[in-house]
Image: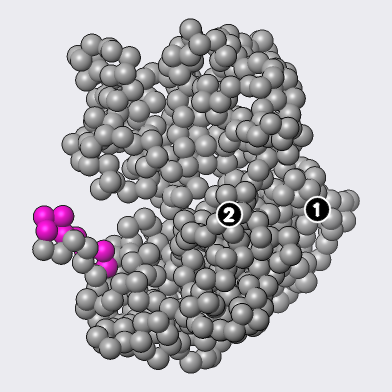
Amino acid sequence: MIEDYYQTRSGNQVDDIIAVDHLTFSYVEGTPVLHDVSLAVPQGSYVALLGANGSGKSTLARHFNGILLPNAGVVRVDGIDTRDDANMMAVKRRVGMVFQHPDNQIVATTVEDDVAFGLENFNLPPDYIAERVTIALEQTGLLPFRTRPPHLLSGGQKQRLAIAGTLAMDQPILVLDEATSMLDAIGRREVLSLVRQLHNAGTTIIAVTHHMDEVLEADYVIVLHQGSVVMTGTPREVFRHNQRLHEFNLDVPLISQVAGLLHETVPSVPSEATDIEEVVMAVLDGLQPGPDALDDGRDSGHRKAEPCISVCDLAHEYLGGTPLAHMGLVHADVTILEGEALAIVGATGSGKSTVMQHLNGIYRPQSGTVIAVGVDLAQPTADIPKVRREVGMLFQNAEDQLFEQLVGDDVSYGPLQLKLPLKEVRQRVRYGLNMVGLDFETFTDRPIYALSGGEKRRVALAGVLALKPRVLVLDEPTAGLDPASAQDLFQRLHRLRDEGVSVVFVTHNLEEVLDLADRVVIMQNAETQGSYPVEELIRDPDILTQHGFEVPPILALQQRLRQQGYAVHGRTPRAVVASLLQSVTILSAEEPSGGVR
């Protein structure tokens, strides 16, 4: 168990700050979400809680500070039974929670008032509260924003504000429940850097996450599946079991996937490797570059097709004519081609979503032009219903688009507005549900409230697809999804693109760009900065660096290998390994490797 790991590492027994003993919990009687869970979290540890959607990890996290109480079993925090009403406030003083959506836990009208809120609830002296608030704001880098309204903060700043509230309380335990899933790369980096600082200062960290690279930050991993603990170990130990993780609808970091595939042919490559340099050194020791290694002969051009949407010199001002007026978009030029997949990437506040909401007429052009499926959206007589039929839109919180009581009624709403015969409407509903992997007979009469979060997102997409759009626009389509669900969604988007649908998606995840996109539009400071074929980014990842992005590990690995003379070019781990093995000589275990370098 985890305590054994810490005892081995330190040479001394470590006290458990959280102990869970045979915990069972149900939201609905007879349907346990957690079943006989036992675990211990040592004081000062950094634990990643990993599991697919519906595995029970968020439910477990909510037991750590008494938001939920066990139906059976015991949860103790610093020795306190969470079921003891007399000590409930003592538990909450010890455990800080930061949720996926920080807006859900921000309650005040200024940053400093929000940080002070928890302390004020404990009736602490005003001077002490002011001192703790200042310290917390300094630690999180929010001191310059202390009087700013929280709704004017970026996503990363809001997450830091949520953490600041726990810092002010001086809580020894911090639980992060998917706290970075909605953040761009910069926001994630800010939050993870702060969390590392807190851990180094002695705070116990429990991180619920779907990001495999974030798991590498932890000392120890606990994997949940269907409400039970199924795996424990260090990240390296857990990621060694790639196939077993797949059975739990999870994955391993892309670098580990590359290492595992290489290990099948070159055993000297550690299958559990998680570090780029470790893989590079193993390749140098086991593979000799071929004579034509640096020329992979690939065409970096993209498909030639007619535009279906053209955005030219677009600008947009929010709250114009008021003291809060600001430019959401300064300048944007975007062309979307028939049958292509286009990714729009950029930091929070770069204007991505503003562009997206112009594509089917949610916003009309204030300045510039948008021509969508042949309709000039700047014209007062523009045929907006036609545009919205042919340009389908799925928002980041897609479940918010659902409004009927039953699945079939919600999916059929769009086709019914087209005045189609009922037989055709039924066929459209069947088509939409089948395209998202939901059986028509099973789901059409199911209540919306009875669906899981992932199922709701699929139903929302089915409702859009039932209109059979020419263009599908998605805003952060995989936010909050586990790896298996995200992979399934992208397989379906591949299928739609292959059928001729143009797919436009906004994302913070450059690995998703590599998965699906033909082209990528980069946005910064409310302006488009350039449009690049994805193949060009694979050849030259420095383009991403020049625009302020972190290079995805799979591209950084390829770049390092090419610098060593190896031909390697691919979007996926399997493609990278295949291209590498095509142009190398595999060295025997006895053969000296000095000449390889």
Per the model, the C-alpha gap separating discs 1 and 2 is 45 Å
Numbered disc in front, either 1 or 2: 2
Tell me, yes or no, whether the highlighted magenta stretch contains residue 325: yes
Q: Quick check: 479 above or below 390?
A: above
Residue type for callout 1: His
Residue type for callout 2: Ile
Q: Mark 1 or mark 2: which comes first in sequence?
A: 1
Q: Residues within 10 Å of mark 1 (few under 14, many from 20)?
A: some
- Quadrant of residue 443 within the rendered picture: bottom right
Q: Using the image as rendered, state which of residue 544 and residue 164 is in the foreground.
A: 164
* Label of residue 263 in the image: 1
- Write the residue at 54% across / 50% down: 480
Q: Residues within 10 Å of mark 2 (few under 14, many from 20)?
A: many
Question: Regarding mark 1 in the picture, which secondary structure is present there?
Answer: helix
- Quadrant of residue 261 within the rendered picture: bottom right
On screen, residue 220 versus residue 519, left or right, reads right
Where is residue 158 shown, x and y percent of the image?
35, 41
Q: Which residue is mark 2?
A: 448
On screen, residue 233 versus residue 479, left or right, reads right
Q: Quick check: 365 above or below 324?
A: below
Where is residue 491 shown, x and y percent of the image?
67, 67
* Label of residue 95 in the image: none
Where is residue 547 shown, x and y percent of the image?
38, 63
Question: Regarding mark 2 in the picture, which secondary structure is present there?
Answer: helix
- Write the residue at 35% across / 76% down: 361
The number of numbered badges drawn on the structure is 2
Magenta residues span: 322-330
Where is residue 447 shown, x and y percent of the image?
61, 54
Tell me, yes or no, whether the highlighted magenta stretch contains residue 32: no
Q: Using the image as rendered, state which of residue 86 and residue 79 is in the foreground.
A: 86
- Write the residue at 66% across / 27% down: 25
Res. 273 visible in picture: yes
